Amino acid sequence: MNRRYLLKTFSLAGALAILPRLRAGEPFIRMEFPVLRLGNMAVTILRDSSGQTDASCLIGATEPMLKRSLPSGKFDSVIQAFLVSTPQKKILIDTGLGLKLHDNLQKCGLRAGALDAVLITHMHGDHIGGLLRNGKAAFPRAQLFLPQEEHAYWSAKAGSTGESARAIASAYGKRICLFKAEALGNLKAKEAPGESANLPAGVRAIAAHGHTPGHTMYLLESKGERLLIWGDLMHAMEIQLPYPEVAISYDVDPVEAVKTRKRVLASVAGSGIPVAGMHNASLNFGRIISTREKSYAIKSHPGA
Ligand SMILES: [Zn+2]
């Protein structure tokens, strides 16, 4: 975790809005949860795990690329979820593996029953792991928003992810809201097409297929301020920003994942829209810029 960045972006007002039960003697808790304020929203990162991943899982990374961008042969990797607090709702975007999610929510002063909605980017285990507890729905009141292509693909699949998808469907039953995400267009466009109408106010779902067949990003907006939570658009920013053509073995369709990554990067570069992701280890919230070499880099977002 980038401590300097946290110090720079930490907002006391934002943290207090998110952590209503925080007591004065617990400053370490505030540092544990980076917060970005977005108009009337506060977006908090809930980190589930962190470690290092070997570069051998990358697809299409040549020796010169690795030498330049990942000389250690490894990259830092995290798994995280996002808590979005609006004046009306408490929303979770993804649930990580579920290792620390419920402890993290508790530290933020929230019981599982306080969550109104859970939005899922895609149904890999490191994103849906916190949805069930002891085989039951971990969030007793929340609507569960699933991209319809994603749900259809995994529900019909054999293996552990298919089993998880079916167990989740039966545990959440009528609280599941399947939706069709907007096509990936120009993210700079201000007007929101109506297709995301059933999602919570201020949230748009945008298709970013490739990593999985229904992989979806969420664009949050409040009072004209935006944040793109891009899910698994990137796993190793150190190499996939300068070389967006590098894929990863977890991509269901690496070719489509590369196309999507290039389109999203071209769309957000220079737009000022901050971005965040479930596996962005090197910084919490950033802005994409184009570089002279016709690739991309990321800068800390000054927000919060
Ligand atoms: Zn993932």
Image (cartoon, helix red, strand yellow):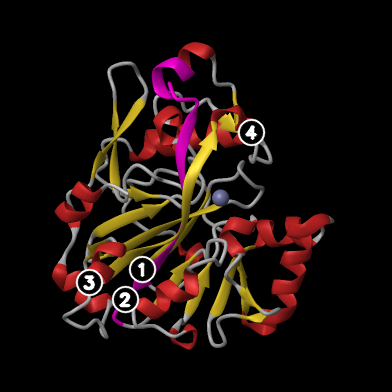
- Residue 257 lies, in percent from the top left, at 58, 36
Q: Residue at x 22, y 76 (%)?
A: 26
Dot 1 or dot 3, earlier in sequence:
3
Q: CA distance from mark 1 to mark 3?
A: 20 Å
CB contact under 8 Å: marks 3 and 2: no
Q: CA distance from mark 4 to mark 3?
A: 38 Å
Three-letter residue code for mark 3: Ala
Which region of the structure is painted magenta?
Answer: 66-87
Mark identifier at residue 84: none
Q: Secondary structure at mark 4?
A: helix
Please give the residue where the numbered disc 3 appears in the rendered image. 15
Dot 4 or dot 2, earlier in sequence:
2
Does 81 lie within the magenta span?
Answer: yes
Q: CA distance from mark 4 to mark 1?
A: 31 Å
Mark identifier at residue 86: 2
Q: Residue at x 58, y 56 (%)?
A: 126
Dot 4 or dot 1, earlier in sequence:
1
Tell me if I can see residue 304 in this picture.
Answer: no
Mark identifier at residue 254: 4
Which of label 1 and label 2 is nearer to you? 2
Mark identifier at residue 202: 1
Q: CA distance from mark 1 to mark 2?
A: 9 Å
- Residue 243 lies, in percent from the top left, at 45, 24
Q: Residue furthest right?
A: 158
Q: Secondary structure at mark 3?
A: helix
Dot 1 or dot 2, earlier in sequence:
2
Q: CA distance from mark 4 to mark 2?
A: 35 Å
Does 89 sit left or right of 2 as displayed?
right
- If the image is split into quadrants, where does the C terminus sit? bottom left
Does 70 sit left or right of 162 as displayed?
left
